[in-house]
Image (cartoon, rainbow, N blue to C red):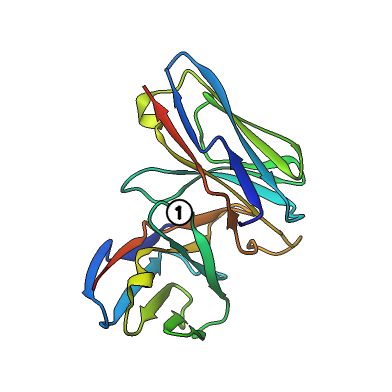
Amino acid sequence: ETGVTQTPRHLVMGMTNKKSLKCEQHLGHNAMYWYKQSAKKPLELMFVYNFKEQTENNSVPSRFSPECPNSSHLFLHLHTLQPEDSALYLCASSQHQTGAPNTGELFFGEGSRLTVL
Amino acid sequence: GQQVMQIPQYQHVQEGEDFTTYCNSSTTLSNIQWYKQRPGGHPVFLIQLVKSGEVKKQKRLTFQFGEAKKNSSLHITATQTTDVGTYFCAGPSGGYQKVTFGIGTKLQVIP
């Protein structure tokens, strides 16, 4: 139990479907992240939110659309995905200290395993 | 942007042998973090190093941060089957809250 909950844990979708991944953190953190983990690749940062404001978009295709309604919830809306988007999508949170160049430790959820057919 | 290189990508060891993974950055890092991901699991934070030349120990794990703050290592003494997993280093990169991960070292321990 990490304090970061992701749903669904597994998702299979067609290329024309629209689905959403959900992340909720119960740690009182102010920053939330989406990472993509593919086989034989480093963890890829997708988006960062700080106090609900997006602070990083790491050149992610527009078929991935994040939403952060408050500091505890983060969504990743998916539409017209490609088979190469199949991966483990990890949500993380941290307590970011204003003025510091780095983040605190990242607390990851268990991930949402996405398969695009 | 800043890249974090990690070697080796894979390591098989006999139980009881030592294991080391190395992390190198193209730029000076303000800090470096290490994570462990068990098979089928998610990354779990192990430690953060901040100071030049810093050495920290957690039981059989020894973490080092280089004097130039561009490299780091994780050494496990007398590996056990519970050490199996992928070990990642991670460092801040460019953006205010961007954390870049190395590709990871996958450790297999043969009983």
| Chain to which mark 1 belongs | B
Disc 1 designates what residue?
Answer: B41
Please identify the quadrant where the N terminus of chain A is shown: bottom right
- Observer-nearest residue: B17 or A74? B17
- Observer-nearest residue: B7 or A90? A90
Counting from the top left corner in percent of width and height, residue B103 is at 36, 56
Tell me if A78 is positioned left or right of B110 in this view: right
Q: Which residue is rendered at x = 26% and y = 78% of the image?
A: B15
- Observer-nearest residue: B61 or B97? B61
Counting from the top left corner in percent of width and height, residue A38 is at 38, 43
Residue A34 vertical placement versus A62 (above, below) = below
Q: Which residue is rendered at x = 24% and y = 67% of the image?
A: B11
Identify the secondary structure beneath mark 1.
loop
Counting from the top left corner in percent of width and height, residue B34 is at 48, 68
Please identify the quadrant where the C terminus of chain A is shown: top left
Q: Which residue is rendered at x = 74% and y = 45% of the image?
A: A72
Q: Which residue is rendered at x = 45% and y = 57% of the image?
A: B101
Tell me if B23 is positioned left or right of A58 in this view: left
Residue A94 vertical placement versus A18 (above, below) = below
